[in-house]
Amino acid sequence: MTVIDVFNGDADGICALHQLRLAEPQQSTLITGVKRDIALVKQVQASASDQVTILDISFDKNRDALLPVLETGASVTYIDHHFPGDIPEHKNLTTHIDTDAEMCTGLIVNALLNGQHLAWAVTAAFGDNLLTTATDAAAPLKLSDTQLDQLKSLGTLLNYNGYGSTLEDLYFPPAELYKRVQPHASPFTFINEDSAYKELAAGFASDHERALSIDSERSTDDVAIYVFPNESFARRISGVYANELAQQNPTRAHALLSELDDGSYLVSVRAPLNNRTGADELCRQFETGGGRKAAAGINKLPANELEKFANAMSVQFASS
Protein backbone atom coordinates (compact mmCIF):
# COMPACT_ATOMS: atom_id res chain seq x y z
CA MET A 1 0.00 0.00 0.00
CA THR A 2 1.20 3.49 -0.91
CA VAL A 3 0.00 6.61 0.89
CA ILE A 4 -0.23 9.65 -1.39
CA ASP A 5 -0.80 13.15 -0.02
CA VAL A 6 -1.89 15.81 -2.51
CA PHE A 7 -2.06 19.34 -1.13
CA ASN A 8 -2.07 23.00 -2.03
CA GLY A 9 1.32 24.61 -1.47
CA ASP A 10 -0.05 27.46 0.66
CA ALA A 11 -0.58 27.86 4.41
CA ASP A 12 -3.96 26.14 4.40
CA GLY A 13 -2.77 23.11 2.45
CA ILE A 14 0.41 22.68 4.48
CA CYS A 15 -1.31 23.15 7.85
CA ALA A 16 -4.21 20.87 6.91
CA LEU A 17 -1.88 18.03 5.94
CA HIS A 18 0.33 18.63 8.97
CA GLN A 19 -2.62 18.21 11.33
CA LEU A 20 -3.63 14.96 9.67
CA ARG A 21 -0.15 13.50 9.78
CA LEU A 22 0.42 14.55 13.38
CA ALA A 23 -2.74 12.62 14.24
CA GLU A 24 -2.10 9.74 11.81
CA PRO A 25 1.63 9.49 11.03
CA GLN A 26 2.38 8.01 7.61
CA GLN A 27 5.30 7.82 5.24
CA SER A 28 3.73 9.33 2.14
CA THR A 29 4.40 10.44 -1.40
CA LEU A 30 3.93 14.22 -1.54
CA ILE A 31 2.33 15.96 -4.51
CA THR A 32 2.15 19.75 -4.35
CA GLY A 33 3.38 22.90 -6.09
CA VAL A 34 2.97 26.66 -6.18
CA LYS A 35 -0.33 27.86 -4.76
CA ARG A 36 -1.87 28.36 -8.19
CA ASP A 37 -0.90 24.88 -9.37
CA ILE A 38 -4.18 23.23 -8.46
CA ALA A 39 -4.44 20.62 -11.23
CA LEU A 40 -2.44 18.26 -9.04
CA VAL A 41 -4.52 15.08 -9.15
CA LYS A 42 -3.30 14.32 -12.68
CA GLN A 43 0.10 13.60 -11.11
CA VAL A 44 -1.31 10.78 -8.95
CA GLN A 45 -0.16 7.29 -9.96
CA ALA A 46 -2.27 5.01 -7.79
CA SER A 47 -3.05 1.31 -7.56
CA ALA A 48 -5.65 -0.75 -5.76
CA SER A 49 -5.32 -0.54 -1.95
CA ASP A 50 -3.44 2.79 -2.12
CA GLN A 51 -4.68 5.62 0.10
CA VAL A 52 -4.91 9.08 -1.46
CA THR A 53 -5.66 12.22 0.56
CA ILE A 54 -6.38 15.45 -1.35
CA LEU A 55 -6.39 18.76 0.50
CA ASP A 56 -7.28 22.35 -0.38
CA ILE A 57 -7.55 22.07 -4.15
CA SER A 58 -10.70 22.49 -6.20
CA PHE A 59 -12.68 19.33 -6.82
CA ASP A 60 -14.16 21.02 -9.87
CA LYS A 61 -10.71 21.52 -11.42
CA ASN A 62 -9.60 17.95 -10.67
CA ARG A 63 -12.73 15.89 -11.30
CA ASP A 64 -11.62 14.47 -14.67
CA ALA A 65 -8.25 13.42 -13.26
CA LEU A 66 -9.82 11.96 -10.11
CA LEU A 67 -12.16 9.50 -11.81
CA PRO A 68 -9.35 7.27 -13.20
CA VAL A 69 -7.70 7.27 -9.74
CA LEU A 70 -10.93 6.00 -8.19
CA GLU A 71 -11.25 3.30 -10.85
CA THR A 72 -7.86 1.86 -9.87
CA GLY A 73 -9.41 0.79 -6.57
CA ALA A 74 -7.49 3.34 -4.52
CA SER A 75 -9.41 4.97 -1.67
CA VAL A 76 -9.59 8.76 -1.85
CA THR A 77 -10.37 11.25 0.90
CA TYR A 78 -11.05 14.74 -0.46
CA ILE A 79 -11.06 17.70 1.97
CA ASP A 80 -11.57 21.22 0.64
CA HIS A 81 -13.44 24.53 0.79
CA HIS A 82 -13.46 25.63 -2.86
CA PHE A 83 -16.36 25.43 -5.33
CA PRO A 84 -16.70 21.67 -6.06
CA GLY A 85 -19.21 21.47 -8.90
CA ASP A 86 -20.82 18.06 -9.25
CA ILE A 87 -19.43 15.43 -6.88
CA PRO A 88 -19.85 11.89 -8.22
CA GLU A 89 -20.90 9.07 -5.92
CA HIS A 90 -18.22 6.40 -5.75
CA LYS A 91 -17.56 3.67 -3.22
CA ASN A 92 -13.89 4.65 -3.00
CA LEU A 93 -14.51 8.38 -2.47
CA THR A 94 -15.06 10.19 0.83
CA THR A 95 -15.53 13.96 0.71
CA HIS A 96 -15.48 16.68 3.36
CA ILE A 97 -16.19 19.87 1.42
CA ASP A 98 -17.50 23.07 3.01
CA THR A 99 -17.61 26.22 0.86
CA ASP A 100 -18.68 28.61 3.61
CA ALA A 101 -16.76 31.89 3.15
CA GLU A 102 -15.48 31.70 6.74
CA MET A 103 -14.16 28.16 6.36
CA CYS A 104 -10.74 26.84 5.30
CA THR A 105 -9.41 23.34 4.82
CA GLY A 106 -7.37 23.50 8.01
CA LEU A 107 -10.53 24.16 10.02
CA ILE A 108 -12.36 21.29 8.32
CA VAL A 109 -9.50 18.96 9.28
CA ASN A 110 -9.53 20.40 12.80
CA ALA A 111 -13.21 19.42 13.15
CA LEU A 112 -12.51 15.92 11.84
CA LEU A 113 -9.73 15.53 14.43
CA ASN A 114 -11.79 17.03 17.27
CA GLY A 115 -9.31 19.86 17.77
CA GLN A 116 -6.24 17.69 18.40
CA HIS A 117 -3.89 20.21 16.75
CA LEU A 118 -5.92 23.39 16.91
CA ALA A 119 -2.96 25.80 16.82
CA TRP A 120 -2.11 24.63 13.30
CA ALA A 121 -5.74 25.07 12.21
CA VAL A 122 -5.66 28.63 13.56
CA THR A 123 -2.46 29.21 11.58
CA ALA A 124 -4.22 27.95 8.44
CA ALA A 125 -7.16 30.30 9.00
CA PHE A 126 -4.86 33.27 9.47
CA GLY A 127 -3.09 32.29 6.26
CA ASP A 128 -6.41 32.37 4.39
CA ASN A 129 -7.12 35.90 5.70
CA LEU A 130 -9.90 34.68 8.01
CA LEU A 131 -8.69 36.90 10.82
CA THR A 132 -11.84 37.02 12.96
CA THR A 133 -12.53 33.33 12.40
CA ALA A 134 -8.96 32.44 13.35
CA THR A 135 -9.08 34.55 16.49
CA ASP A 136 -12.39 33.01 17.55
CA ALA A 137 -11.16 29.49 16.81
CA ALA A 138 -8.08 30.11 18.98
CA ALA A 139 -10.13 30.87 22.11
CA PRO A 140 -9.71 27.37 23.68
CA LEU A 141 -5.93 27.75 23.43
CA LYS A 142 -5.97 30.76 25.77
CA LEU A 143 -3.09 32.40 23.93
CA SER A 144 -1.58 35.75 24.78
CA ASP A 145 -1.89 38.57 22.26
CA THR A 146 1.77 38.04 21.39
CA GLN A 147 1.24 34.35 20.70
CA LEU A 148 -1.82 35.06 18.57
CA ASP A 149 0.20 37.58 16.56
CA GLN A 150 2.89 34.92 16.07
CA LEU A 151 0.36 32.49 14.59
CA LYS A 152 -0.99 35.24 12.36
CA SER A 153 2.53 36.00 11.16
CA LEU A 154 3.28 32.33 10.55
CA GLY A 155 0.08 31.82 8.57
CA THR A 156 0.83 34.92 6.51
CA LEU A 157 4.38 33.80 5.76
CA LEU A 158 3.45 30.23 4.85
CA ASN A 159 0.85 31.67 2.49
CA TYR A 160 3.31 34.21 1.09
CA ASN A 161 5.75 31.44 0.24
CA GLY A 162 3.17 29.69 -1.95
CA TYR A 163 2.61 32.51 -4.43
CA GLY A 164 4.52 32.62 -7.68
CA SER A 165 4.25 31.38 -11.25
CA THR A 166 6.98 28.77 -10.79
CA LEU A 167 8.91 27.19 -7.95
CA GLU A 168 11.80 29.49 -8.84
CA ASP A 169 9.74 32.46 -7.60
CA LEU A 170 9.47 30.92 -4.12
CA TYR A 171 11.87 30.90 -1.19
CA PHE A 172 11.06 27.24 -0.49
CA PRO A 173 9.38 24.60 -2.66
CA PRO A 174 6.16 23.81 -0.75
CA ALA A 175 7.08 20.14 -0.29
CA GLU A 176 10.35 21.19 1.34
CA LEU A 177 8.59 23.73 3.56
CA TYR A 178 6.10 21.07 4.65
CA LYS A 179 8.97 18.74 5.54
CA ARG A 180 10.50 21.50 7.67
CA VAL A 181 7.18 22.00 9.46
CA GLN A 182 6.70 18.23 9.89
CA PRO A 183 8.84 17.70 13.04
CA HIS A 184 6.98 20.40 14.98
CA ALA A 185 3.87 19.49 16.96
CA SER A 186 3.64 23.15 17.96
CA PRO A 187 3.83 26.06 15.53
CA PHE A 188 5.74 27.97 18.18
CA THR A 189 8.68 25.57 18.06
CA PHE A 190 8.82 25.95 14.28
CA ILE A 191 8.82 29.75 14.67
CA ASN A 192 11.60 29.65 17.28
CA GLU A 193 13.78 26.84 15.96
CA ASP A 194 13.65 26.76 12.15
CA SER A 195 15.54 29.42 10.19
CA ALA A 196 12.91 29.22 7.43
CA TYR A 197 10.65 31.45 9.50
CA LYS A 198 13.21 34.26 9.69
CA GLU A 199 14.11 33.89 6.02
CA LEU A 200 10.48 34.20 4.97
CA ALA A 201 9.93 37.15 7.32
CA ALA A 202 12.89 39.03 5.82
CA GLY A 203 11.77 38.27 2.27
CA PHE A 204 8.23 39.34 3.00
CA ALA A 205 9.36 42.64 4.55
CA SER A 206 11.43 43.48 1.46
CA ASP A 207 8.69 42.54 -1.03
CA HIS A 208 6.04 44.34 1.01
CA GLU A 209 8.02 47.59 1.00
CA ARG A 210 8.19 47.47 -2.81
CA ALA A 211 4.47 46.72 -3.07
CA LEU A 212 3.58 49.77 -1.01
CA SER A 213 5.09 52.03 -3.67
CA ILE A 214 2.63 50.86 -6.36
CA ASP A 215 -0.60 52.81 -6.73
CA SER A 216 -3.86 51.42 -8.09
CA GLU A 217 -4.48 51.65 -11.83
CA ARG A 218 -8.23 52.02 -11.35
CA SER A 219 -10.16 52.74 -8.20
CA THR A 220 -13.81 53.39 -7.33
CA ASP A 221 -15.81 53.01 -4.15
CA ASP A 222 -16.59 49.42 -5.18
CA VAL A 223 -13.40 48.06 -6.78
CA ALA A 224 -9.68 48.72 -7.06
CA ILE A 225 -7.28 47.16 -9.57
CA TYR A 226 -3.51 47.12 -9.11
CA VAL A 227 -1.03 46.13 -11.83
CA PHE A 228 2.37 44.86 -10.70
CA PRO A 229 5.48 44.44 -12.88
CA ASN A 230 6.89 41.20 -14.28
CA GLU A 231 9.17 40.51 -11.34
CA SER A 232 9.39 37.65 -8.83
CA PHE A 233 8.69 39.95 -5.87
CA ALA A 234 5.37 40.95 -7.43
CA ARG A 235 4.25 37.36 -7.91
CA ARG A 236 5.35 36.41 -4.39
CA ILE A 237 3.60 39.27 -2.62
CA SER A 238 0.45 39.35 -4.77
CA GLY A 239 -1.91 37.22 -2.71
CA VAL A 240 -0.88 38.36 0.75
CA TYR A 241 -0.86 42.01 -0.31
CA ALA A 242 -4.34 41.56 -1.79
CA ASN A 243 -5.42 40.25 1.62
CA GLU A 244 -3.94 43.34 3.26
CA LEU A 245 -5.73 45.68 0.87
CA ALA A 246 -9.00 43.89 1.65
CA GLN A 247 -8.43 44.42 5.38
CA GLN A 248 -7.72 48.13 4.85
CA ASN A 249 -10.81 48.70 2.66
CA PRO A 250 -13.47 46.21 3.79
CA THR A 251 -16.26 47.64 1.62
CA ARG A 252 -14.28 47.37 -1.63
CA ALA A 253 -13.24 44.44 -3.84
CA HIS A 254 -9.60 44.28 -4.93
CA ALA A 255 -7.71 42.73 -7.82
CA LEU A 256 -3.96 42.51 -8.02
CA LEU A 257 -2.56 41.68 -11.47
CA SER A 258 1.07 40.62 -11.89
CA GLU A 259 2.43 40.75 -15.44
CA LEU A 260 3.86 37.47 -16.82
CA ASP A 261 6.58 36.88 -19.42
CA ASP A 262 4.13 36.63 -22.32
CA GLY A 263 2.30 39.85 -21.38
CA SER A 264 -0.62 38.08 -19.74
CA TYR A 265 -1.47 38.53 -16.06
CA LEU A 266 -1.54 36.44 -12.90
CA VAL A 267 -4.63 37.72 -11.03
CA SER A 268 -5.56 37.66 -7.33
CA VAL A 269 -9.10 38.79 -6.43
CA ARG A 270 -10.52 39.52 -2.99
CA ALA A 271 -14.21 40.11 -2.37
CA PRO A 272 -15.13 42.90 0.08
CA LEU A 273 -14.64 41.73 3.65
CA ASN A 274 -18.09 42.94 4.60
CA ASN A 275 -19.60 40.69 1.91
CA ARG A 276 -17.27 37.74 1.30
CA THR A 277 -18.80 36.42 -1.89
CA GLY A 278 -18.43 36.66 -5.65
CA ALA A 279 -14.67 36.29 -6.16
CA ASP A 280 -14.99 32.73 -7.47
CA GLU A 281 -17.93 33.67 -9.72
CA LEU A 282 -15.88 36.45 -11.27
CA CYS A 283 -12.75 34.37 -11.85
CA ARG A 284 -14.60 31.34 -13.22
CA GLN A 285 -15.71 33.55 -16.13
CA PHE A 286 -12.14 33.25 -17.41
CA GLU A 287 -10.48 30.09 -18.71
CA THR A 288 -7.83 29.64 -16.03
CA GLY A 289 -9.84 31.12 -13.16
CA GLY A 290 -11.13 29.57 -9.96
CA GLY A 291 -11.08 29.81 -6.19
CA ARG A 292 -13.51 30.39 -3.38
CA LYS A 293 -16.18 32.93 -2.57
CA ALA A 294 -13.96 35.37 -0.68
CA ALA A 295 -10.70 34.92 -2.57
CA ALA A 296 -10.02 33.64 -6.06
CA GLY A 297 -7.66 34.08 -8.96
CA ILE A 298 -6.84 33.66 -12.63
CA ASN A 299 -3.61 31.93 -13.54
CA LYS A 300 -3.24 33.54 -16.96
CA LEU A 301 -5.45 36.44 -18.02
CA PRO A 302 -4.63 37.41 -21.63
CA ALA A 303 -3.75 41.08 -22.01
CA ASN A 304 -6.55 41.53 -24.52
CA GLU A 305 -9.05 40.43 -21.85
CA LEU A 306 -8.00 43.05 -19.30
CA GLU A 307 -10.89 45.37 -20.17
CA LYS A 308 -13.31 42.45 -20.11
CA PHE A 309 -12.03 41.53 -16.65
CA ALA A 310 -12.26 45.11 -15.35
CA ASN A 311 -15.82 45.44 -16.61
CA ALA A 312 -16.84 42.05 -15.20
CA MET A 313 -15.34 42.95 -11.84
CA SER A 314 -17.25 46.24 -11.75
CA VAL A 315 -20.49 44.39 -12.49
CA GLN A 316 -19.76 41.60 -9.98
CA PHE A 317 -19.09 43.95 -7.10
CA ALA A 318 -21.38 46.88 -7.93
CA SER A 319 -22.96 48.18 -4.75
CA SER A 320 -26.72 47.94 -4.73
Image (tube, helix red, strand yellow):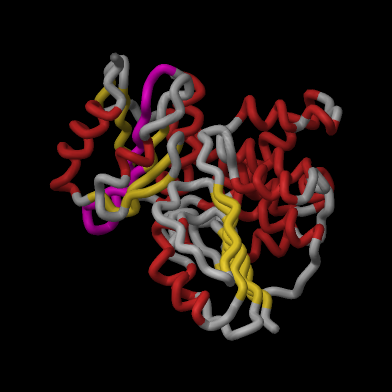
Question: Can you say whether 3 is above or below 152 in the image?
Answer: below
Asked where in the image residue 64 lies, by quadrant, the reply is bottom left
Residue at horizontal 80 percent and vertical 59 percent from the top: 22
Asked where in the image residue 217 lies, by quadrant, the reply is top left
Q: Which residues are magenta?
A: 251-267
In this view of the protein, which residue sits in the foreground, 203 or 16?
16
Asked where in the image residue 188 lies, by quadrant, the reply is top right
- Would you say 264 lies left or right of 157 here? left
In this view of the protein, which residue sits in the foreground, 105 or 259?
105
Residue 138: within the magenta?
no
Residue at horizontal 56 percent and vertical 41 percent from the top: 204
Question: Can you say whether 146 is above or below 83 in the image?
Answer: above
Q: How many marks?
A: 0
Residue at horizontal 70 percent and vertical 27 percent from the top: 135
**Can the viewer see residue 202?**
no
In this view of the protein, which residue sits in the foreground, 107 or 236?
107
Residue 264: within the magenta?
yes
Question: Can you say whether 47 is above or below 135 in the image?
Answer: below
Q: Can you give x and y, in whole percent of width and height, for residue 262 in the image?
A: 23, 58
Q: Can you give x and y, in whole percent of width and height, for residue 42 in the image?
A: 44, 73
Quarter occupied by the C terminus: top left
**Can the viewer see residue 60?**
yes
Q: Can you give x and y, in whole percent of width and height, for residue 177 in the image?
A: 65, 59
Residue at horizontal 50 percent and vertical 56 percent from the top: 57
Quarter occupied by the N terminus: bottom right
Question: Can you say whether 257 is above or below 165 in the image?
Answer: above
Q: Can you give x and y, in whole percent of width and height, for residue 77 in the image?
A: 61, 63
